[in-house]
Structures are given as C-alpha cells and as structure tokens.
Amino acid sequence: MLIRELEFRGININHLGMYFEELGGVLVTETFPYIYKANGWSGEIVNESEISFTAVFKVNTVQVRFIAEDEETLSELIKKYRYKTTRIGG
C-alpha cells in the first residue's frame, strides 16, 4: 500500500468528503478519521484545525490521507481530487 498526505486550507470538511464520494468512495466511519473506501483505494479525512493569519483572518486546515494499491492509482486519485479542490478567484 502506498500512502500520501496532503493539507487543504479553506475548504469545508463536508465538501472534502463529498469529493471522495464523487470519485466513487463510500463513507465507512462517522468520526475522525472519516474513511472513504473504493475499489483499489481509500481516502481519510484525518483531522481539522484552524490557523490564524491575523487576529481576524482564520482558516481551517484539513489533513487528508490517500491510500492506494499502486503508484498509478494513487497518482490518478490525487490528480482527480486536487482538480475538485481547485478554487479560481474572479
């Protein structure tokens, strides 16, 4: 098994879970770590915390773990997941 962890900032934790579901994952836990399982991979929302840039500007940070059977599956999963988390300013 191959494992990679990424941190996402400023994205609602419910949206991060929904992205796993859109990629074929099924939620199998109800508390941290939230685990999503699919054929050949799993994803985990490990924890959520908050960081302060100033006294007023605070952002959530979420640790997400990706697990796959092989490098190709892991790379493709992360690529698709990151695409879903892309935020374009306007």
Image (spheres, helix red, strand yellow):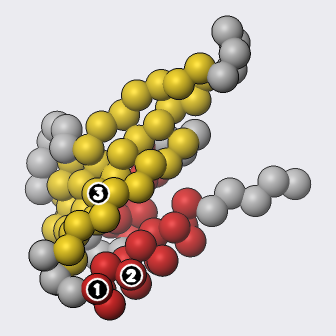
Label 1 and label 3: CA atoms lie apart by 14 Å
Label 2 and label 3: CA atoms lie apart by 13 Å
The first of marks 2 and 3 along the sequence is: 3
* Frontmost residue, 84 versus 59: 59
* Vertical order, 11 against 22 (above or below): above
Q: Nearer the viewer, mark 1 or mark 3?
A: 1
Secondary structure type for disc 1: helix
In the rendered image, residue 22, in percent from the top left (x then y), is placed at: 39, 70
The residue positioned 47% from the left and 25% from the top of the image is 50
Q: Give the farthest residue toward the bottom.
A: 72
Whether residue 32 sits left or right of residue 12 in the image: it is left
Which residue position holds label 1?
A: 71
Secondary structure type for disc 2: helix
The amino acid type found where label 2 is placed reads Ser
The amino acid type found where label 3 is placed reads Arg
The first of marks 1 and 3 along the sequence is: 3
Whether residue 56 sits left or right of residue 14 in the image: it is right
Which residue position holds label 3?
A: 65
The residue positioned 53% from the left and 24% from the top of the image is 51
In the rendered image, residue 56, in percent from the top left (x then y), is placed at: 69, 12
The amino acid type found where label 1 is placed reads Glu
**Mark identifier at residue 75:** 2
Secondary structure type for disc 3: strand
